[in-house]
């Protein structure tokens, strides 16, 4: 059986679930935000150490020992019962439930996509990504992660005033909310007048990389799907394609050099993953420059724009371990 862990609003999980249903694969979708309000968990060990784990949801008893492959997409954290009104108590309950579930996922004897949750969290580290990418021979932009204004000024001089700023970690969405995003921005001369403010919180600064096109390279197992994002055609996406201007930005499949394709697979595997969305730049003079990898990056938008069969490759990977075919679909957790 396949276990899909994601939120109720995740279109990626819903799309793959539909494809799995057409294939006749047995799968369960579960949104951890339903625990413990609308789900119960039974974990036990016999004296000999034999474990059992059963998830009770909507009148169903799901034997988690039957899970052969699990997809850790974008699960939400548990939400306490409404009856738990005290803020401190709610925070404790939700954190305890989250830790129990994380412990459970780590204990499942199954294959994970993109990787075990603890491995995914580790692979999200941008400094680790740069270190591993460099060891594999990827070209990187000159990079500084710092809270020293002198470092920022030195990089600015080194790069003739052409540098960009980025988040150093992933705290922005958690602290500010998912409705806001911090884009990659050019550092202007006016910004440098406030360089001292960097003392309060570290940021990442990199040399600006000239772009012929940007590349979104999605690795699924050992399959590689590369797409060109012609972000330079419109000013809106010139410095960060995540500003999205779909009506005026062309997207096309891209043929990577064979050696670079091989290294993309090696990068994902070196981080302990089976999936990764890699962002790179193809410069006007033909160099491929690595920026970062998202262990759980979105892909439906690029699949829809290019026709690259990424969802089918994910289904292939999820069913590769022999998940039972012909069994009924058990969709649990609000994912259609």
Image (spheres, rainbow, N blue to C red):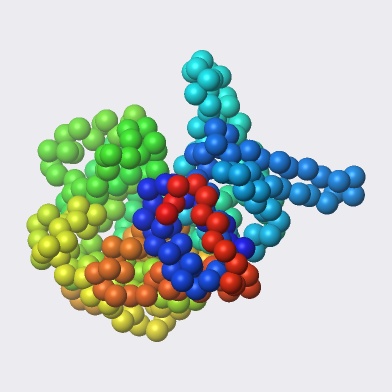
Q: Residue at x 12, y 38 (%)?
A: 190
Q: Residue at x 53, y 28 (%)?
A: 80
Q: Residue at x 64, y 46 (%)?
A: 55
Q: Position of residue 323 (x, y in %)?
A: 62, 69
Vertically, is 57 above or below 275?
above
Number of marks:
0
Q: Is residue 249 left or right of residue 221?
A: left
Q: Is residue 255 left or right of residue 58?
A: left
Residue 264 appearing in the image: no
Vertically, is 236 above or below 227?
above
Q: Position of residue 226 (x, y in %)?
A: 33, 74
Outermost residue, top direction? 86
Outermost residue, bottom direction? 258
Residue 142 appearing in the image: yes
Q: Position of residue 181 (x, y in %)?
A: 27, 43
Q: Quadrant of residue 19?
A: bottom left
């Amino acid at each position: 059986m396949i276990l899909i862990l994601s939120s109720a609003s995740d279109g990626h999980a819903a799309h793959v679930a539909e494809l799995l249903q057409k294939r006749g694969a047995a799968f369960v979708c579960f949104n951890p935000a339903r625990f413990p309000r609308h789900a119960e968990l039974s974990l036990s060990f016999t004296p000999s150490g034999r474990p059992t784990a059963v998830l009770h949801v909507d009148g169903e008893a799901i034997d988690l020992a039957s899970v052969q492959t699990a997809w850790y997409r974008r699960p939400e954290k548990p939400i306490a019962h409404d009856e738990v009104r005290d803020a401190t108590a709610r925070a404790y309950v939700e954190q305890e439930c989250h830790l129990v579930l994380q412990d459970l996922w780590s204990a499942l004897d199954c294959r994970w996509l993109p990787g075990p949750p603890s491995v995914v969290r580790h692979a999200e580290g941008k400094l680790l990504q740069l270190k591993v990418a460099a060891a594999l021979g990827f070209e990187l932009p000159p990079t500084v992660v710092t809270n020293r204004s002198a470092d920022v000024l030195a990089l600015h001089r080194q790069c003739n005033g052409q540098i960009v700023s980025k988040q150093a970690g992933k705290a922005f969405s958690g602290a500010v909310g998912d409705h806001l995003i911090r884009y990659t921005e050019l550092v202007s001369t006016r910004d440098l007048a406030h360089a001292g403010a960097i003392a309060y919180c570290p940021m990442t600064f990199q040399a600006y990389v000239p772009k012929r096109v940007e590349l979104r390279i999605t690795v699924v197992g050992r399959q590689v799907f590369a797409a060109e994002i012609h972000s330079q055609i419109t000013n809106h996406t010139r410095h960060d394609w995540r500003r999205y201007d779909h009506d005026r930005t062309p997207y096309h499949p891209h043929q990577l050099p064979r050696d670079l394709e091989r290294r993309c697979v090696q990068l994902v595997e070196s981080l302990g993953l089976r999936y990764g969305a890699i962002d790179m730049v193809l410069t006007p003079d033909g160099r491929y420059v690595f920026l970062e990898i998202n262990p759980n990056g979105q892909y439906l938008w690029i699949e829809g724009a290019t026709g690259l069969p990424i969802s089918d490759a994910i289904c292939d990977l999820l069913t590769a371990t022999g998940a039972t075919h012909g069994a009924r679909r058990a969709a649990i957790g609000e994912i259609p």
